[in-house]
Image (cartoon, rainbow, N blue to C red):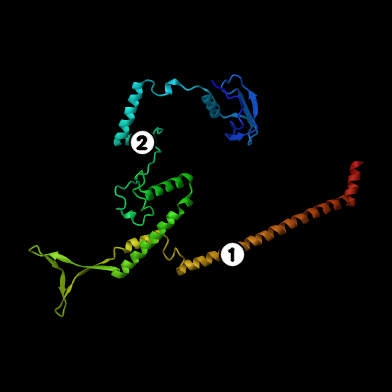
């Protein structure tokens, strides 16, 4: 083994009680001749609990590894035939795209023990620029040039949500939700415009099949001899989605406190809060008066005791008791 001839200038220590890792530039250094690879041991006081701590085990293992000679079994092929065989394998993998893709995928998940927590962004459009979400995409000019071939916009959205949920930070998605709310508001306005243009009702003529199997429009005759067609009247199909958007996004008049009842309740709540504040002030005044009364009560008790000690009847009684 090749030992390091000088002690380290900075080391990492670990406290076994409070589980704290910290660095120190002025540790206590003891000789450790049994460690041939690095004959010193390091100690320092924990900044949290004050207990003496020793160097972390992974730094000790790293020093031992660096001082040890390389293992001949891990130095690659030894003969020309073995080197030729390894080179042929590498060339075969590079010339076969399918095997290369499998090797890359295997290296990506080389340390994967199970798939319980494995998450992969799978937004890979086959034809960049030919999808509905490609319109107005900020990465439109770069789409298709990324080596992974994934949709950059969808991958960014995927990663931002993953990080936000892992860090439990909703503020990281605030701009995304703001854009979504703006798009929902635009859709809501388009629904209103469509209803205004076409009306709130949809009229369709009623029909029935006759004896010959032909379709006939349903009509009835008026007293003046004219005929009137029977129409089926239905509500506009966009009314239901419009009301759902209004209720789910708090866009109704009660939600915005714009109805008379909601306005009265708001005024009552304000009055209740004002009354509560005045009551709190009255309670504080009452508490101050109570404190003053208790202080005066203490003085009264002391004066009463002094007066009791000067009572002539009590003095005469005590003298009789002493006799």
Residue 113 locus on image (x, y percent): 40, 32
Residue 214 locus on image (x, y percent): 10, 64
**Residue at 45% across, 45% down:** 163
Instruction: Judge whether residue 298 can be spotted in this image.
Output: yes
Label 1: element kind: helix
**Residue at 63% across, 28% down:** 43
**Quadrant where the N terminus lies?**
top right
The reply, left or right, for residue 190 in relation to residue 36 is left
**Residue at 31% across, 53% down:** 129
- Closer to the camera in the image, 37 or 286: 37
- Closer to the camera in the image, 147 or 174: 147
Which of the 4 quarters of the picture holds residue 278? bottom right
Q: Which residue is mark 2?
A: 104
Q: Report the residue that reaches farthest toward the left.
A: 212
Q: Residues within 10 Å of mark 2 (few under 14, many from 20)?
A: few
Label 2 close to label 1 by CB (< 8 Å):
no
- Closer to the camera in the image, 61 or 250: 61
Which of the 4 quarters of the picture holds residue 98? top left
Q: Is residue 8 above or below residue 211?
A: above
Between the C-alphas of marks 2 and 1, the distance is 69 Å
Q: Which residue is mark 1?
A: 274
Please name which of the two marks, 2 or 1, marks the residue nearer to the observer. Answer: 2
Instruction: Judge whether residue 114 can be spotted in this image.
Output: no
Residue 140 locus on image (x, y percent): 36, 53
Label 2: element kind: helix
């Amino acid at each position: 083994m090749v030992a390091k001839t000088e002690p380290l200038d900075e080391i990492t220590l670990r406290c076994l009680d409070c589980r704290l890792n910290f660095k120190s530039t002025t540790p206590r250094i003891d000789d450790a001749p049994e460690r041939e690879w690095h004959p010193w041991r390091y100690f320092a006081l924990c900044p949290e609990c004050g207990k003496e701590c020793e160097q972390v085990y992974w730094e000790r293992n790293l020093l031992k590894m660096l001082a040890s000679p390389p293992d001949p079994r891990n130095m690659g092929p030894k003969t020309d035939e073995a080197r030729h065989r390894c080179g042929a394998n590498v060339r075969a993998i590079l010339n076969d795209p399918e095997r290369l893709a499998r090797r890359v995928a295997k290296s990506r998940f080389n340390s994967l023990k199970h798939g319980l927590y494995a998450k992969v962004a799978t937004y890979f459009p086959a034809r960049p620029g030919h999808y509905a979400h490609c319109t107005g995409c900020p990465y439109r000019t770069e789409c298709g040039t990324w080596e992974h071939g994934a949709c950059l916009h969808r991958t960014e959205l995927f990663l931002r949500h993953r990080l936000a949920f892992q860090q439990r930070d909703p503020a990281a998605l605030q701009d995304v939700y703001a854009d979504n709310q703006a798009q929902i508001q635009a859709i809501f306005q388009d629904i209103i415009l469509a209803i205004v243009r076409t009306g709130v009702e949809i009229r369709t003529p009623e029909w029935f099949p006759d004896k010959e199997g032909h379709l006939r429009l349903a009509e009835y005759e008026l007293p003046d001899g004219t005929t009137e067609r029977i129409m089926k009247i239905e509500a506009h199909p966009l009314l239901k989605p419009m009301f759902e958007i209004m209720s789910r996004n708090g866009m109704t008049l009660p939600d915005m406190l714009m109805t008379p009842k909601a306005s009265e309740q708001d005024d009552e709540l304000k009055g209740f809060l004002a009354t509560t504040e005045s009551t709190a002030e009255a309670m504080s005044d009452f508490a101050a008066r109570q404190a003053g009364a208790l202080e005066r009560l203490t003085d009264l008790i002391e004066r009463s005791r002094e007066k009791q000690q000067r009572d002539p009847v009590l003095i005469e009684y005590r003298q009789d008791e002493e006799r």
